[in-house]
Amino acid sequence: MENKEAFIFLKKKTRLLGFHDFNRHIEAIGPLEIKTSKARFKKHLVKIICMQQISVTAATAIWKRVEAVLDSSIGRKPSIELNRKLKESGLSEQKINYVNGIYFNPELNISKKTLQKKTQGEVEQLLIKQKGIGPWTVEMVRLFYLCDPNVISLLDLGIKNAHSIAFQGQDYSQDFFDQFSPFNSYLCLYLWRLLEDENLSI
């Protein structure tokens, strides 16, 4: 299985590169799985919007309320009533605009199977033009929705903080993480766990 292959690869690679503390961390945890979302694509994107720039605990609580609103009868286009409900759920005006732009965009009525047939560039092109979606969101889609095994999120603050612990003195760059290809997504999971972050899915 891919996760076991990734575990063996990363354990060997970190040992060869001399990152012994992180190597022991990986070995102690064992194989990790990428927990991919089973939600419809648009709902998954809205969840990521809810998770942006706030704590995991707060984001989880807000998402549960937003999801309940989206699962109710919300109509076929944005409305004052829907905006009121989203605001009561804890979303800012800006995020409400993002949610409306995503949820009522017919271009995003696309299945996971269809998305998986697209190239990385095509996925990025589809997403990046949506308001509220930037490179970090694209990375999270690739990792937690499309289960791409080789995503390194250089824009993620948690990854940056964990890197300073696991790889002290090393450049925080794409070139550095290329050493862990083709399993950078799994490396992200181990780095997040280094921060004791149990939220391993978005």
Image (spheres, rainbow, N blue to C red):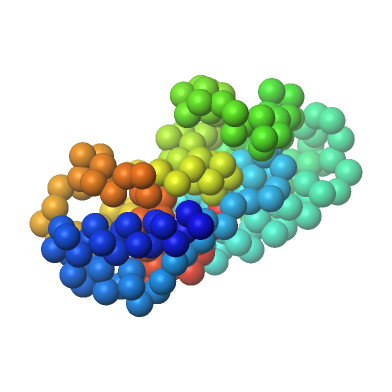
Rendered location of residue 4, percent (x, y): 44, 62
Rendered location of residue 139, percent (x, y): 45, 40
At a point 46% along the width and 34% down the height, the residue shown is 134
Relative to the observer, which residue lies in front, 119 or 191?
119
Reply above or below: 147 against 127.
below
The residue lying furthest to the bottom in this view is 28
Quarter occupied by residue 197 = bottom left
Relative to the observer, which residue lies in front, 108 or 145?
145
Give left or right: position of 154 versus 126.
left
Give left or right: position of 88 versus 118.
right
Give left or right: position of 55 versus 103.
left
At a point 78% along the width and 46% down the height, the residue shown is 70
Relative to the observer, which residue lies in front, 14 or 101?
14
Residue 137 makes an appearance in the image: no
Rendered location of residue 48, percent (x, y): 57, 47
At a point 70% along the width and 59% down the height, the residue shown is 64
Rendered location of residue 62, percent (x, y): 64, 58
Relative to the observer, which residue lies in front, 12 or 170?
12
Count of numbered tags:
0
Reply above or below: 39 against 32.
above
At a point 47% along the width and 58% down the height, the residue shown is 3
